[in-house]
Amino acid sequence: MSSREFATPVFRGGRFDAGALPLDVLPDLAAYRDLIVDLAKSLFLAREPGRRRVPKGFVESFQIGIRAVNSGSTIAVLERASVQGGMLTLFPKEDLFDEARNLIEKVVAAAGQKGPLPPEFPQHLARRFNQFGRSLRDGESVELRGPGATSGPTYDRGARKWIVVQAEGRYEDSAELTAMVSGGVLDREQITVRLDDGALVDGRCSADLVRQTLALLERRVRVVGLGSFDRNDHLERLLRVDDVAPIDDDEAVLGAPSALGAQFADLASLPAGWFETDTPALDRAGLQAVEVFLTAIATSGVPVPHLYPTPDAGVRAEWSLGGWEISATFDLVGACSAHLHATHVSSDSAEHADVALDAADATSTFTAFIRQFLTAGASL
């Protein structure tokens, strides 16, 4: 059976800079293949309104595999087996799988510009992008290149979210959070946890995990799984719960921060001169704006930070996550802003970003910065 090059996706950043293709990325390539198949089927049926299904052998005619992984970041060369037999005569003027590949590139390019999805793209297939690119971490991307192309649109977590949200209003992503166990229903294989802002979130899990979780009723736990988030990155529900682990009592007493409301109440009670005689009290309006902002951040699964006043009458939030020490320093006066900084404790690696709290993408930018350090894979 002969073959030809179908696409050469180029993976960049993070794990891909070493030139290897991690095994946990393979499901993304399988999802890419499934997306192409579903889109090709939709294109066929749109042009053949008299048919209710694609011809026998249509799906089987599309077979791709990884021929090679080349250097230069990580380039996966995808090869397609040539169509044989009667399928050759089905589409004398066009190949719908090639067309589907090209249309996916147009969708990704539109997402990169935060523009509307192409009108020829079936809106109901946007949710399929939830599966494609799920393993990508912040700072990682894949450039989609057709055969012979030297460049193509870049697909990353931001583009993935944009595409799905345009059609669905929500998107799926990994979730790791701390919460209080509120309850569960064994027969429904469901647990309920209470976030730090008081919101109740349901999650689906195995009956065994429900039993384990019910034994932790009203205890603080870490939850890991797959979540559904709204367009503002607020966690709506846990589609799958993989693990629920109690937070040690010593950690809860000595290490875990108090609820946001209690911490902000303490900050608001500081009098003028709390640090030096000329140090003013913290700006109440600025404190309220930061409290509202961090409360929204907490609903996306970001852990509650420790909060401290700064000598210049600002507020500093601190997290310790996966070998990283992370801080966000808030300027409370005028248009509130935050300077984000992360330092790896055992290397010289550092990340930073600045966020204006009144910016349209402030919540998503801030959340994305923190969440990249939530998994152990974020540490070096």
Image (cartoon, rainbow, N blue to C red):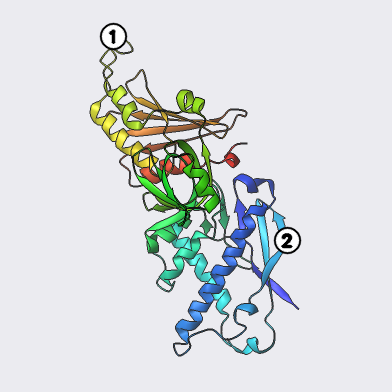
Q: Foreground: 8 or 366? A: 366
Q: Is residue 138 left or right of residue 339?
A: right
Query: Is label 1 in a helix, a strand or a loop?
Result: loop
Q: Is residue 231 left or right of residue 370?
A: left
Q: CA distance from mark 1 to mark 2?
A: 68 Å
Q: Is residue 375 left or right of residue 75?
A: left
Identify the residue shown where x is 30% and y is 41%: 358
* Residue ranking furthest to the left: 285
Query: Is label 2 in a helix, a strand or a loop?
Result: strand
Q: Foreground: 253 or 40? A: 253
Q: Foreground: 178 or 273? A: 178
Counting from the top left corner in percent of width and height, residue 326 is at: 49, 31
Counting from the top left corner in percent of width and height, residue 178 is at: 46, 38
Label at residue 68: 2
Identify the residue shown where x is 69% and y is 88%: 85
Q: Report which residue position mark 1 lands on.
A: 277
Say which quarter of the image contains residue 262.
top left
Work out whether 271 lies above or below 75: above
Say which quarter of the image contains residue 344.
top right
Amino acid type, mark 1: Thr
Work out whether 123 lies above or below 70: below
